[in-house]
């Protein structure tokens, strides 16, 4: 090989080295290029979580302020002595408002009802004695249900006034006969003024005494 050819051969090698160097620069340039910013997914997630929290608390407040007191449970205060000794004047009770809606009331349950209809704010607290469809009569100090003596121990004193129950009273399919435990002073289904209590006028079943603390607990 002559000197000229050797020179050309060296130049070719140099040119090839330059091309490889340029390619390496190109690769480095690609690797060092700034990446595109990703969407702010975390920010959107936080905003969505905040929205869910607000909706949850809004629903919770609605349930506590409207649903619970109107359809589930309500606080009631006893006024008077017609349910002594079971309940005393001024005691605070919790009344659940589901039983009567599902026809789940039982004999001897204590109920809150509106004797003059729901348009009136006045309510009474009494005990269920007669159930829908039954015939009630009071003879002497005894209560008869469908001709048989009712065994019960809730009366504070013996009955002295049978009122309208001196004659047999047959209840309708949506009616209850109620009496106060303090039967000598109670204005209840024995009177014409109160009469049979219709289901539509029942506000709920008293289940728990919360005040005074000395008598705190479930009601019997």
Image (cartoon, rainbow, N blue to C red):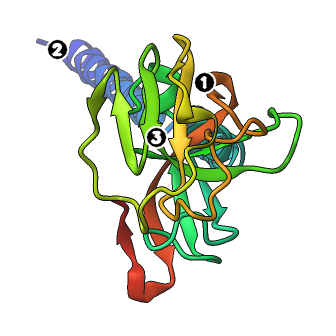
* Extreme residue in the left direction: 1
Above or below: residue 192 compared with residue 131: below
Residue that badge 3 annotates: 128
Comes first in the chain, label 3 or label 1? 3
Identify the disc placed on residue 2: 2
Give the image location of residue 179, x and y in percent. 53, 48
Residue at (52, 10) in percent of width and height:
173
Above or below: residue 40 compared with residue 214: above
Comes first in the chain, label 2 or label 1? 2
Give the image location of residue 23, x and y in percent. 37, 24
Relative depth, front residue between 3 and 75: 75
> Disc 3 vs disc 2: which is toward the camera?
3
Residue at (42, 68) in percent of width and height:
156
- Quarter location, residue 108: top left
Residue that badge 1 annotates: 199
Q: In the picture, which quadrant includes the C terminus? A: bottom left
Give the image location of residue 70, x and y in percent. 68, 40
Q: CA distance from mark 3 to mark 2?
A: 129 Å
């Amino acid at each position: 090989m002559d000197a000229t050819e050797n020179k050309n051969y060296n130049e070719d090698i140099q040119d090839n080295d330059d091309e490889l160097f340029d390619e390496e620069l190109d690769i480095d340039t690609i690797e060092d290029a700034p990446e595109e910013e990703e969407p702010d997914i975390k920010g959107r997630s936080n905003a969505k979580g905040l929205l869910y929290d607000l909706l949850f608390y809004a629903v919770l407040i609605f349930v506590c302020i409207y649903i619970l007191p109107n359809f589930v449970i309500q606080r009631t205060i006893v006024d008077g002595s017609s349910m002594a000794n079971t309940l005393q004047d001024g005691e605070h009770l919790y009344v659940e408002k589901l039983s009567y809606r599902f026809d789940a009331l039982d004999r001897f349950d204590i109920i809150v009802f509106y004797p003059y209809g729901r348009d009136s704010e006045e309510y009474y607290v009494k005990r269920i004695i007669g159930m829908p469809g039954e015939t009630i009569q009071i003879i002497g100090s005894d209560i008869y249900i469908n001709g048989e003596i009712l065994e019960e121990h809730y009366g504070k004193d013996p009955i002295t006034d049978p009122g309208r129950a001196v004659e047999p009273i047959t209840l309708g399919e949506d009616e209850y006969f109620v009496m106060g435990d303090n039967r000598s002073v109670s204005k209840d289904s024995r009177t014409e003024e109160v009469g049979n209590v219709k289901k539509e006028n029942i506000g709920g079943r008293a289940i728990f005494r919360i005040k005074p603390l000395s008598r705190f607990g479930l009601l019997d």
